[in-house]
Image: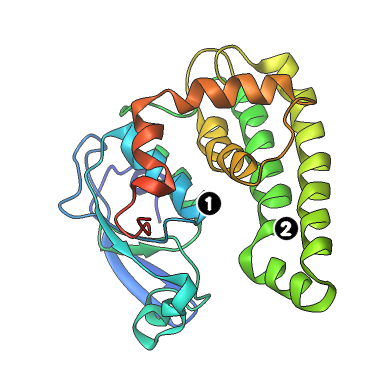
Amino acid sequence: MSPLCRSWGCSEKLTFADSEMATQVTAHTRTDQLPQKVTLYSYHLSSCSWRVQLALLFKGIPYEYKAVDLSRGEQFSDEFTKLNPLQMVPVLAIDGVTLVDSIGILLYLEERFPDKRPLLPKDLVQRAQIHQVVSLISAYIQPLQMGRILATIEAKFGKEEQLKWIQDVYRKGFSALEQILIRTAGKYCFGDTVTLADIVLVPQFGNAIRLQMDLAPYPTIQRVGEALNELPEVKSSVPANQPDARKS
């Protein structure tokens, strides 16, 4: 594919092959043109889905929410497996292509709609620092708390050991994150503008509160997290406000 097409400057046919799926998509000529239809396959308690929903809300991209009930095993259905052979959420259908990784989706949305509330600065050093935080949360903290991992720990070692595992993951991850944010944070993770770092922090901060973690050792994370929770996009995205949330 030519460099021009990478920047959406032509209408060359592209082929995306992912496991058993192959989809043809025509590259867009304008990055400010909203797609005709966007569908987010999600589960209200999924941290990864929460990230994608936040990015869509901050960028003002209308989307349809399709619930996939992980607690009932709907991700293992033949229909959903065709969308994502990994049988996980989120899945985003956009621009005639199906995307299945939350970080990949976030980067696609940022590059596809760079002028709609940018979530990455132009400065390369700042971008690298933001990616560092994104990686810390998405590659270290969150994956070690995935449902299937926690279920395995509980089955083999019991609920008490599962809780110790969660607390240890948070303690190590948040200790490192706190040291980074001490140097970079303003109102949010990097200054006073919401970035991809904040997008991935919100779900992890929300889970820490839900699990009643002691956040006193991480004052910067707590301050930033509380500031983010006041934003209307964040309030709209919380699990309790999703269509598939179980109302008590």
Q: Amino acid at mark 2?
A: Leu
> Could you give the CA–CA distance between mark 1 and mark 2, rounded to whole angstroms?
12 Å
Which quadrant holds residue 243?
Answer: bottom left
Q: Amino acid at mark 1?
A: Ser
> Which residue is pictured at 57% across the width and 32% down the height?
197
The one of 125 and 136 positioned closer to us in this rendering: 136
| Left or right: 73 in relation to 197 | left
Check the image and report above or below for 21 versus 181.
Answer: below
Contact, mark 1 vs mark 2 (Cβ under 8 Å):
no
Task: Where is residue 125? Give x, y as percent.
Answer: 65, 22
Check the image and report above or below for 200 versus 180.
Answer: below
Would residue 6 be seen by someone viewing this image from the given angle? no
The one of 9 and 227 positioned closer to us in this rendering: 227
| Left or right: 30 in relation to 137 | left
Task: Where is residue 222? Give x, y as percent.
Answer: 65, 24
| Left or right: 201 in relation to 141 | left
Which quadrant holds residue 130?
Answer: top right
Whichever of callouts 1 and 2 sits on the residue coming sooner in the sequence is 1
For label 2, the residue is 144
Would residue 147 be seen by someone viewing this image from the given angle? yes
> Which residue is pictured at 82% across the width and 78% down the height?
156
SS label for mark 1: helix
Question: Which residue appears farthest toward the front when viewing the image?
Answer: 248
| Left or right: 33 in relation to 139 | left
Check the image and report above or below for 52 versus 222.
Answer: below
For label 1, the residue is 47
Question: Which residue appears farthest toward the left when viewing the image?
Answer: 36
The one of 179 and 34 positioned closer to us in this rendering: 179
Sort mark 1 into few (<14), some (14-19) or many (20+) by Cα contacts within 10 Å. many
Task: Where is residue 18? Give x, y as percent.
Answer: 47, 73
Which quadrant holds residue 216?
Answer: top right
